[in-house]
Image (cartoon, helix red, strand yellow):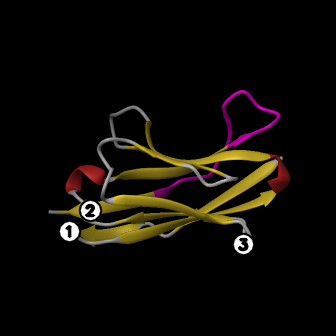
Amino acid sequence: QVQLDESGGGLVQAGGSLRLSCAVSGRVFSLLVMAWFRQAPGKEREFVAAISWSPGTTMYADSVKGRFAISRDNAKNTVYLQMDGLKPEDTAAYYCAAKTISGKGYDYWGQGTQVTVSS
């Protein structure tokens, strides 16, 4: 089992920044990929960014490239999402997700943290 605990959401004005954190506990040794997804009201959940636990290869949705940066601190078992240049359309609940060696997809999800960007 893997447990994910997100934090760092909040209300920010357009153009501002936030950093989300996802603390990982449990079977950390089984991690393959960590990712952030988001879901806005009335919309489907969408991929935002992902990072391999080792060696740290990253991937981004086109909508956030150049504005968001995903990183991880293996010593702290924490994944971060630095969000700069926020836009109102970034408003959503953001979820941390984990893919492990024993699963077929993103098997573990956090509870979500709300990000609201005002215009």
Residue 119, given in percent of the width and then of the height, sits at 14, 63
x 78%, y 50%: residue: 2
Q: Mark 3 or 2, which is nearer the eye?
A: 3
User: Quarter-wise, where is residue 16 in the image?
Assistant: bottom left
x 61%, y 55%: residue: 56
x 40%, y 31%: residue: 44
Q: Which residue is mark 3?
A: 76
Which of marks 3 and 1 precedes in the sequence? 1
Residue 82, given in percent of the width and then of the height, sits at 43, 66
Left or right of 111? Residue 28 is right
Structural distance between the alpha carbons of marks 1 and 2? 5 Å
Say what amino acid the circle numbered 3 marks.
Answer: Lys
Query: Mark 1 Cα within 10 Å, few/some/many (few <14, many 20+)?
Result: some
Left or right of 62? Residue 19 is right
The answer to whether marks 1 and 3 mark residues whose Cβ atoms lie closer than 8 Å is no
User: Quarter-wise, where is residue 47 in the image?
Assistant: top left
Say what amino acid the circle numbered 1 marks.
Answer: Gly
> So how many labels did they put on this image?
3
The answer to whether marks 1 and 2 mark residues whose Cβ atoms lie closer than 8 Å is yes
Above or below, 72 relative to 63: below
Task: Point out the stretch of residues depicted in magenta.
Answer: 99-113
Residue 92, given in percent of the width and then of the height, sits at 36, 50
Which of marks 2 and 1 precedes in the sequence? 1
Say what amino acid the circle numbered 2 marks.
Answer: Leu
Residue 110, given in percent of the width and then of the height, sits at 62, 51
Which of marks 2 and 3 precedes in the sequence? 3
Structural distance between the alpha carbons of marks 3 and 2? 26 Å
Residue closest to the eye, 57 or 50 = 57
Magenta run includes residue 106: yes
User: Quarter-wise, where is residue 85 in the image?
Assistant: bottom left
Residue 15, numbered label: 1
